[in-house]
Amino acid sequence: MIFAHLPALEVVVPLVAAPLTVLVRRSSVAWAVATAACTFSFIAALLLTAEVAAHGPISYHIGSWAPPWGIEYRVDTLSAFVLVLVSGMAAVVAPYAWRSVAAELPRDQVYLFYTMFCLSVAGLLGMTITGDAFNLFVFMEISSLSSYVLIALGRDRRAQYASYQCLVLGTIGATFYVIGLGMLYLATGTLNIADLAQRLQHVENLRPVLAGLAFITVGISLKLALYPLHLWLPNAYTYAPSAVTAFLAATGTKVSVYVLLRFYFSVFGFRLVAETLPMPEILLVLSILAIVSASLVALFQTDLKRLFAYSSVAQIGYITLGMSMASRDGLTAAVVHLFNHGITKGALFLLLGGVALRSGRAGLDRVRGLGRSMPLTSVGILIAGLSLIGVPGTAGFVSKWYLALAAIEAGRWWLAALVVATSLIAVAYVWRFVEAAYLSEPDARTPAPGESPLAMLVPAWALVAATVYFGFDTSYTVAAARAAAALLLGGAP
Amino acid sequence: MSVGGHFGYWVAVLLMIAGLYIVIARGNLVKKLIGLSIFQTSVYLLYIAPGKLIGGTAPIITPAFKTYSNPLPHVLILTAIVVGVATLALGLALVVRIREAYGSIEEDEIVAADRAGGDGG
């Protein structure tokens, strides 16, 4: 009985947990509520994945109103995969927040952190699971507004300005999305994603549809920090509290990528996107620019959080690069990298949170000799760094492999070479950490020997372990991504 | 279709451009938020104007009426208005905090203060 309502519970449980944390006020109880809600969502996402694998896509009608009139929650292979990533990251970050947030926030604000965290989780899960395009906007705003608050909680005053910039650019992005959606609604008279896809095929006047496509592309690209619309991202990731950076870096932009995939392949159909507008070419050029320029900028950063924030912009470039090829291998690479990069960056930022806790700030000058003073943390950062580069035996290799494969299959040898060559820039920026942590003598600013608290180290290392595990055993990630790619391409008329 | 038939769209587009221009061109953080609000408001009009038919009534089926207005855009925009209010409230709250931390709400002064490397706050 309760199983039939899992798709709704997946979102409702963290959504209800948010006001509960305000009511209890005690930070320890609020933490327990938030952790329990996130863990529940994770288990529910795993159950939904099993259900989808066994019986095909699930369509849940909110309030028993049949779509396209009522709001439909739809779980298929792709959305189940993203649900697992988002709820899994939430379930890892929530336990981590116990020590990390207590150290970074004033005592009386801690319970409010969990409120915003639960709202953000609920919003991201809702964006993923909903089958209604306007409902998606509402969830997008729930997750965005709460993430602006989370970013503003950073100790540095620059966090507040970073959050303000996020708010302005994020709202412009969301409004562009609504404008685009409005045009689609005027052309078709429906908001249900499946229904939209069907009716768009019979629309004769394509002009408003294409305008809608353009608005939605720009709006979502702002949200997913596609180069050159990434300006809000580095500051936000640098000054937000550690737990927030880890969670947002692993999930926020990824869910937006998912939304763009949905619109391009499920709603418009890639034939329309590719033939009437030069979208694949634009995406290709922007992706390459993102990879090259953001990687180069990352090289010259002295703050590790900022360094890896720029690396995020570059890694998003790899995802959109896979998308732009629109072949089965290309989409597989995009979806796999969405997951692999999520866990890699999550691990990195969680470990950097430990460094920041022990030495005040995650600067390159603070990690000199870190290999000796915090051995477990620095080994973890090293392994996650190797995954960013794409060294065999880590999750990052799997995605780069499929990306290169897709490029070769498309006959673009230069693109495969570019993927390998840009990985060398990643070697260079990860090397800067290695040089400081292992080859430099500790100085006065290095933290005294001693690891970060276990409550922070265990969740972080769980993700590091996942990074290695998914580098060897690809049966879950690649199979799910392949199925998702087939679904996306099959949906295209 | 005449220009008059597109009147709603013209107003919406005008508001859209004006709002976006204010966000980009103004350095004052509060003025930017005002621009953002105008930008969002233009979308309300974009949705609602086409939903109204002249002479149309609420969609309650009675033999007395033949034309009905579409109620769905109103419902959607009711939600969007709530979102807009929440965004504006949060934005203004942030501006208050920024003013406390920097002593200014002018973008160039804040950027200059950050450049100077004051850690403050």
Image (cartoon, coloured by chain):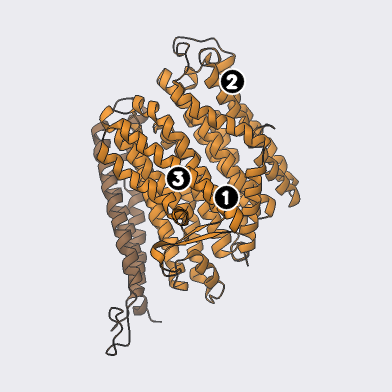
Chain colours: A orange, B brown
* Residue at the spot of label 3: A41
Quadrant containing the N terminus of chain A is: bottom left
Q: Residue at x 49, y 65 (%)?
A: A211
Circle nearer the viewer, 2 or 3: 3
Q: How packed is label 1: few (under 14 Cα within 10 Å), some, or many (20 or more)?
A: some
Tell whether A419 sits left or right of A216.
right
Asked which quadrant contains residue B48, the reply is bottom left
A487 or A286: nearer the viewer:
A487
Q: Which mark is residue A50?
A: 1
A20 or A396: nearer the viewer:
A20
Examine the rendered structure and indicate whether residue A436 appears above or below residue A275: above
* Marks 3 and 1, how far apart at CA: 14 Å
* Residue at the spot of label 2: A434
Q: Amino acid at mark 1?
A: Ala
Q: Among all residues in the image, which is located at the extreme bottom?
A: B63
Q: Where does residue A145 sit, x and y in percent of width and height? A: 35, 46
Circle nearer the viewer, 3 or 1: 1
